[in-house]
Amino acid sequence: MPPLVQFFRRRPTLSTAALLAGSLVWLVVFFLLPLAYLLAVSFAQRSPYGTVQWVLGLGNYGRAFQPLYLEIYWRSCAIALFTTALCAVLSYPVAYTLALRVSARWKSTLLLLVVIPFWTSFLIRTYAWMVILRAEGLINNLLLDLHLIHEPLRLLYTPLAVLIGLVYGELPFMILPLYAVLERMDRSLLEAAQDLGANRWRTFWKVTLPLSAPGLAAGGLLVFIASLGAFITPDLLGGARTLMVGNLIQNQFAVVRDQPFGSAVAFLLTAAALVVLLASLPSARRTTREIL
């Protein structure tokens, strides 16, 4: 046996540290250090020339809770919640069919269709929705040709357009966790429920839905957090009237050049996402323990 292999077998802790070293260095240099810098900047002030002035204080965090910005936070949370609910309603039949109804030979192909949108730039897909939703777009032209409307509907640059774009972009993040949970579900429980006299709907509500709760929770977290911080979709499909917290942060850095205030809002958004994540952990752990 080579001496190097013997050395690592005798020292498993050193071997594990060596394997993790690259990832840890990458995490520290490109994630933790920039976050630490932004945290420091969030306590600074903007100079008259748009640079960072190192006069520390809590003014940026106090400004972040002004009524104007609270309205943006509320709008962002409402749209993120609606997006999560719609993704759950639309994703469940797809995941259920893939896991329990489709034959094994077709599952890989159908799962590939679910993830194919990721092969295309999200920006390009959002521009495609702009073409579909505009006044001369596909939807309005179809409705006009069917004589269902007499003039084009205003679909683009509305909260509805933002909701459509977010649901379209986040849908796979709900389908895949649901599919993973439903695929591992014990089918004999469904057969036992039917043997005891339960019809398909009662079996679904009493057996399938409770057992798929961890998938719903995981998918809901992924969709909600991603939607809460989205800025490309609201910027392109919503315009100035549907400003979300992600757009607010982007504008502070790229347009207003108020990095301290943008950093403060970014950390408040991060804190909100962490609170949601930590609040959901006990429930997810309890549900998983009951199922297993």
Image (cartoon, rainbow, N blue to C red):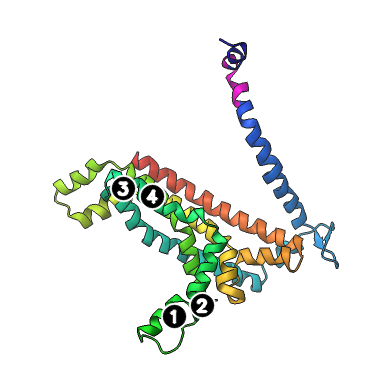
Residue positioned 74% across, 57% down in the render: 42
Mark sitting earlier along the chain (4/2): 4
Whole-angstrom CA distance, mark 1 to mark 2, is 8 Å
> Quick one: label 1, few (<14), some, or many (20+) residues within 10 Å?
many
Q: Amino acid at mark 3?
A: Trp
What span is colored magenta in the figure?
9-16
The quadrant of the rendering that contains the C terminus is top left
In the rendered structure, are the residues bearing label 1 and label 4 in contact, judged by CB atoms less than 8 Å apart? no
Report the Cα–Cα distance between label 4 and label 2: 31 Å
Task: Tell me the quadrant of the picture where the N terminus can be found.
Answer: top right
Mark 1 and mark 3 lie on one chain; the one further toward the N terminus is 3
Query: What residue is shown with label 3?
Result: 106
Residue placed most toward the observer, 36 or 59: 36
Residue 86 image position (x, y, % from top left): 41, 64
Mark 1 secondary-structure assignment: helix
Residue 282: x percent and y percent?
Answer: 46, 46
Q: Residue furthest bottom?
A: 150
Real-space Cα separation, disc 1 to disc 3, in angstroms: 35 Å
Q: Is residue 84 above or below residue 69?
A: above
The type of residue carrying mark 2 is Arg
Q: Main secondary structure of the magenta part?
A: helix
Q: Which mark is residue 134?
A: 2
SS type, badge 2 = loop
Do labels 4 and 2 touch, CB within 8 Å?
A: no
Which residue is label 1 attached to?
Answer: 140
- Work out whether residue 1 or residue 227 is closer to the camera in this orientation and state it: 1
Distance from the alpha carbon under mark 2 to that under mark 3: 36 Å
Q: What residue is shown at x 35% (from left), y 83% (from top)?
A: 146
Can you identify the residue that label 4 sits on?
111
